[in-house]
Image: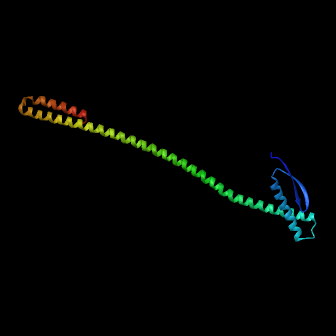
Amino acid sequence: MANKERVIVNINGQEFSVLGSESEEYIMGIAKIVDDNIKEIMKKNKKLSQTMAAILAAFNMADKYTKTFNELNKINQEVVEPLKEFEKMKKDLDDSNSKLQGLRDECNNYKDELLQSKREIENLNKTIKQYEQELKAKEDEINKVNKSVDDLQNKLFEDQVEMVQLRKELREALKMLGMD
């Protein structure tokens, strides 16, 4: 608790001892305001007693205080509503940023999946090329075998039955390879 200070003030010609935690300058300033108000009232109406002037000064200061307090409350309300709106907008912005981050994360996941799919497609394309090369080699081999078969057919008619059997076996082999 702050130290209490005793200050002697003069209000409308009378000295008062005031005890307060504020500075001497502050207390003297308040006393001057009260003194000025009483003197102003007495100057306007010389018939008033000091007590009546003090009561009117107190009334005027209470009126001014009340009006100032009400104005301050009004200003406070005018400030509070925009602050509430600001807080709501800030929360909405935070929510939107959170959703945006979620969407970015989701987008990054999709990018990763897409990259993985592209790699898988590349691997599958390599495998397909290998199979195509193997197929081409097998087709070349089959073509050579067919040429040999034709040559042998022309030369050795009697081996034709055996050749038919070989062709049948060859067709079965092709079916097994899925090349029919």
From the top left corner, tell me how far across and down residue 69 is, in percent: 77, 59
From the top left corner, tell me how far across and down residue 85 is, in percent: 64, 56
Q: From this viewpoint, is residue 180 visible?
A: no
Answer with the quarter of the image where residue 111 lies: top left
Of 76 and 127, nearer the camera is: 76
Rendered residue at 12%/28% (across/down): 162
From the top left corner, tell me how far across and down residue 72 is, in percent: 74, 59
Quarter of the C terminus within the rendering: top left
Rendered residue at 26%/36% (across/down): 131
Establish if 169 lies above or below 39. above
Rendered residue at 90%/65% (across/down): 53
Of 38 and 98, nearer the camera is: 38
Rendered residue at 20%/33% (across/down): 171
Q: Is residue 8 left or right of residue 89?
A: right
Q: Is residue 47 left or right of residue 96?
A: right
Q: Is residue 130 left or right of residue 81?
A: left
Q: Is residue 123 left or right of residue 49?
A: left
Answer with the quarter of the image where residue 16 lies: bottom right
